Image: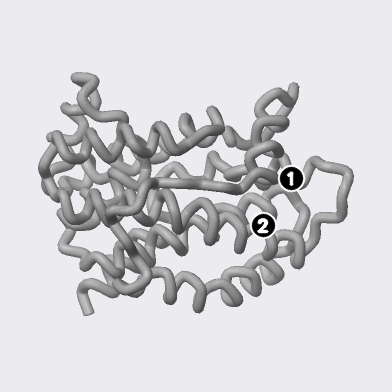
Amino acid sequence: MIATLLAMQQADAAFPSGSFAFSNGIEGVAALPYPFDRDALRRQAEIALRHRWAGLDRIALVRAWRTGDDLGGLAGIDEDVEAANVVASFREGSRRAGRALLTSHARLGTSGADALKAAIARGNLLGHLPTMQGALFRALGMPEREAIAVSGYQAIASLTSAAVRLGRVGALEAQTVIRDLLPEIAALTAPEAIDPGAPLESFTPFLDIAAMRSADAAVRLFSS
């Protein structure tokens, strides 16, 4: 039961993880001269889940969870995440979100958080989000599969929340998108669905281009 409760706490939108500052490309998509409704949001969220989160964040988180408190190993994972994020705003967003999550855990007294902060301060770690999630969730005692589920849920929730804040869909429409994708997240957490040795990869060209266009906008609500 405690594993479930830990996962609920970390996935809670009220947890100060810093994710509210990032749309992960949705702001750029919503600004394009095309219809953007619940169905469009669902398509983009599914693409992001399958072709970015599953091949990049999910694999990096699993590696970090299994690496534990080995700072050298975590540094290598961080470098791979940096290289796999080809869009500058996604790279920067991942680092900022990871460091925000780490700051909250350090203030909460999570085991190992201070050592991770010190490693970042020394320049030995970049602090990417999936790396920090894997290390911190393991330190909390959260099982690997629950840790993956939290990450997957947050990836979708950040997209839907951004769409709501941009005024493109309603809150209930956003919740139907999350509900529809929960089985996909559950399937992607299965041990047989994960190859931790696979190279980190991401291929979401539409979201990537939209994010790059948004980065040059004179006014924007989100950092990515």
**Element type where label 2 sits in the image:** helix
Which amino acid, mark 2? Gln
Residue 144, given in percent of the width and then of the height, sits at 24, 65
Looking at the picture, tell me which residue is in the foreground, 22 or 152: 152
Q: Which is more N-terminal, label 1 or label 2?
A: 1
Quarter of the image for residue 7 reads: bottom left
Give the amino acid type for the residue marked by disc 1 in the picture.
Val
| Residue extending farthest top | 122
At a point 42% along the width and 49% down the height, the residue shown is: 56
| Residue drawn at (44%, 42%) of the image | 18
Residue 162 on image: x %, y %:
63, 50
Left or right, 183 with respect to 26, comes to left
Q: Is residue 32 left or right of residue 156?
A: right
Q: CA distance from mark 2 to mark 1?
A: 9 Å
Q: Residue furthest front?
A: 198
Residue matched to label 2: 44
Give the residue number, with chain letter if any, for mark 1.
29
Tell me, yes or no, whether the two marked residues, 2 and 1, touch with CB atoms within 8 Å.
Answer: yes
* Left or right relative to 219: residue 102: left
Of 100 and 135, the residue lying toward us: 135
Q: Which numbered circle lies on residue 13?
A: none
Q: Answer above or below: position of 3 versus 122.
A: below
Crowding at mark 2 (Cα within 10 Å: few <14, some 14-19, many 20+): many
Q: Is residue 189 above or below residue 156?
A: below
**Horizontal and vertical percent for residue 173?**
71, 69
Q: Is 25 situated above or below 139?
A: above
